[in-house]
Structures are given as structure tokens and as C-alpha cells.
């Protein structure tokens, strides 16, 4: 086995598990790491990858693999100096937001109840005519 050169994160599709593909990766010094199907963090990392690739390579015509590597590293360093924040807004976030809206806040403490608190009536409110 050659020395490990790269960790490759893949989704868990059946085509990524074929013996010939996995053996070829290992022969190149690449270790495949598989994620769960539908892993939302993988979607976010793919978004970042597309942004970095576009910033580094759009309109350019690299002539060597090393040039591509250098441009991507420079772009990533620039990104890290002033990162763009991401907020995940997928289907699960909407579900969490709806669930949060169904809860009842307790005096601004950050705590919630699933049912509203019953208000205690004061004695003046309980007495008719008072």
C-alpha cells in the first residue's frame, strides 16, 4: 500500500463501494470516508467547495495540477481571513422552526413548555363583584 495522501469524503451511494473503485483509490493513496445518505453537512461542504472553485478558477486556464492546487489554497486562505457565514435553511430547519413556534416561552429565560401555563387568578379576580 502506498502512503496515505488524501482523505476523500463520499456519500454512501452504491457506486462508491465497488471493489474496483475502492482498490483504485487505495492504490493512489486515497482513503474513502463514507457519510450517511442525506448528510446535511456534506451538502454544505459541497456548497463551499463550489464557491472556492469558482473564485479560484473561473476565467483562468491552469496549465499544471500544481497551479490548480496553489490557486485553490490561496483562495481558501483568503476565505479564512474573512469567512462567509452560512446558515442552514433546509427542510429540517423549517420543521424545527414550526416546532419551536408551537412551544410557549417562560419569561424570556430560553426555557419552553409544550403547553401554555395556566394563569393564577388573584383573590380579587376570583371574587364576584370585587
Image: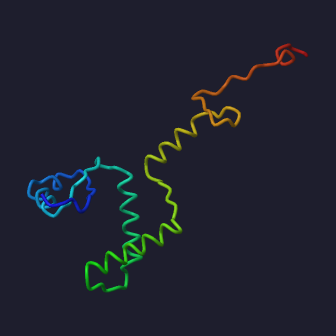
Quadrant placement of the C terminus: top right
Q: Is residue 66 above or below residue 29?
A: below
Q: Is residue 51 above or below residue 22?
A: below
Q: Position of residue 12 (x, y in %)?
A: 23, 50
**Horizontally, is 2 left or right of 126 in the view?**
left
Residue at the spot 40% in from the left edge and 71% down from the top edge: 52
For residue 9, what is the image quadrant?
Answer: bottom left
**Horizontally, is 111 left or right of 90 in the view?**
right
Residue at the spot 43% in from the left edge and 49% down from the top edge: 91
Q: Position of residue 55 (x, y in %)?
A: 42, 76
Residue at the spot 50% in from the left edge and 56% down from the top edge: 87
**Horizontally, is 25 left or right of 111 in the view?**
left
Q: Position of residue 109 (x, y in %)?
A: 67, 35
Q: Is residue 29 above or below residue 106?
A: below
For residue 56, what is the image quadrant?
Answer: bottom left
For residue 124, what is the image quadrant?
Answer: top right
Amino acid at each position: 500500500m502506498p502512503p496515505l495522501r488524501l482523505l476523500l469524503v463520499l456519500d454512501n451511494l452504491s457506486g462508491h463501494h465497488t471493489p474496483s473503485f475502492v482498490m483504485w483509490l487505495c492504490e493512489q493513496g486515497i482513503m474513502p470516508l463514507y457519510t450517511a445518505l442525506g448528510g446535511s453537512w456534506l451538502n454544505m461542504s459541497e456548497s463551499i467547495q463550489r464557491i472556492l472553485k469558482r473564485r479560484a478558477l473561473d476565467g483562468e486556464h491552469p496549465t499544471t495540477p500544481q497551479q490548480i492546487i496553489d490557486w485553490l489554497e490561496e483562495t481558501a486562505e483568503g476565505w479564512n481571513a474573512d469567512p462567509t457565514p452560512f446558515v442552514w435553511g433546509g427542510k429540517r430547519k423549517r420543521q424545527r422552526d414550526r416546532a419551536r413556534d408551537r412551544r410557549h416561552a417562560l419569561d424570556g429565560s430560553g426555557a419552553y413548555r409544550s403547553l401554555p401555563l395556566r394563569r393564577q387568578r388573584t383573590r380579587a379576580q376570583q371574587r364576584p363583584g370585587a
